[in-house]
Amino acid sequence: MRASVYDGGKAEGAAGEMIDPRVQALCEEFEVRIVPKSVYPGPGETRAVGALAKIINRHGMEHARLVMTTLAETENNKAALEAAVFGAASDLIRARPEWVEDTSKWLAVWDRCPVGELQALTHELRGHVSMRSALAGLIYERLWRAFGPRSIQPDLYDDRRRA
């Protein structure tokens, strides 16, 4: 979907929805294609332009770029570019900025994290809890194992401990 700029400083998508030009630029930077809300996004596509605009408005473009790097530049996550996922990644980046400082480790953990599978799991909780919060909790558990106090000396009885 190619956006065209009109008088209001926003871009208009193919379906006529207004797209913040900062969101358009961010998606183009990471080669993420914006699709209409009526289309189910495939790998490397998103329809969550509103979520990205909120992240930019609340936390700035650099934070949004880090969110996009975390998701669009890691192995398992190019197919999970949806609003709840963007929100969860943003929340986790803000909750643990000291973990993000070790960028290669941060991205390596996200590489191994099955975000799409975790997102599907959270759908079972729809209507009871926020999808964004549930997803953030599931991802946090994996990040905590890599960065938390047990990252140096893992629990021997942990069922996720690698041999």
Image: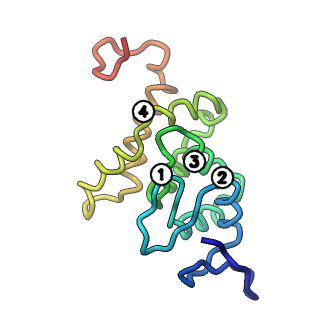
Q: CA distance from mark 3 to mark 2?
A: 7 Å
Q: Label 1: how many residues lie within 10 Å, few (<14), some (14-19) or many (20+)?
A: many
Name the disc covering residue 30, or none. 2
The reply to whether callout 3 and callout 2 are in contact (CB within 8 Å) is yes
Q: CA distance from mark 3 to mark 4?
A: 18 Å
Judge whether 34 appears above or below 64 on screen.
below
**Which one is earlier in the sequence, the residue at label 3 or at label 1?**
3
SS for callout 1: helix
Q: Label 3: how many residues lie within 10 Å, few (<14), some (14-19) or many (20+)?
A: many
* Residue bearing the label numbered 1: 88
- Of residue 115 and residue 89, the one placed in the foreground of this image is 115
**Which one is earlier in the sequence, the residue at label 3 or at label 4?**
3
Look at label 2 and name its amino acid.
Phe
SS for callout 3: helix
- Residue beneath the point at 60% across and 61% down: 55
Look at label 3 and name its amino acid.
Ala
Q: At which x and y percent is residue 149? A: 47, 21
- Residue beneath the point at 60% across and 50% down: 67
Judge whether 54 appears above or below 89 on screen.
below
Q: CA distance from mark 4 to mark 2?
A: 25 Å
* Residue bearing the label numbered 3: 72
* Residue bearing the label numbered 4: 142
- Residue beneath the point at 30% across and 58% down: 129
- Of residue 126 and residue 59, the one placed in the foreground of this image is 126
Look at label 4 and name its amino acid.
Arg
* Left or right placement of residue 22 versus residue 123 in this view: right
- Residue beneath the point at 28% across and 21% down: 159
Q: At which x and y percent is residue 99? A: 59, 33
Q: Label 2: how many residues lie within 10 Å, few (<14), some (14-19) or many (20+)?
A: some
Q: Nearer the viewer, mark 2 or mark 1?
A: 2
**Which one is earlier in the sequence, the residue at label 2 or at label 1?**
2
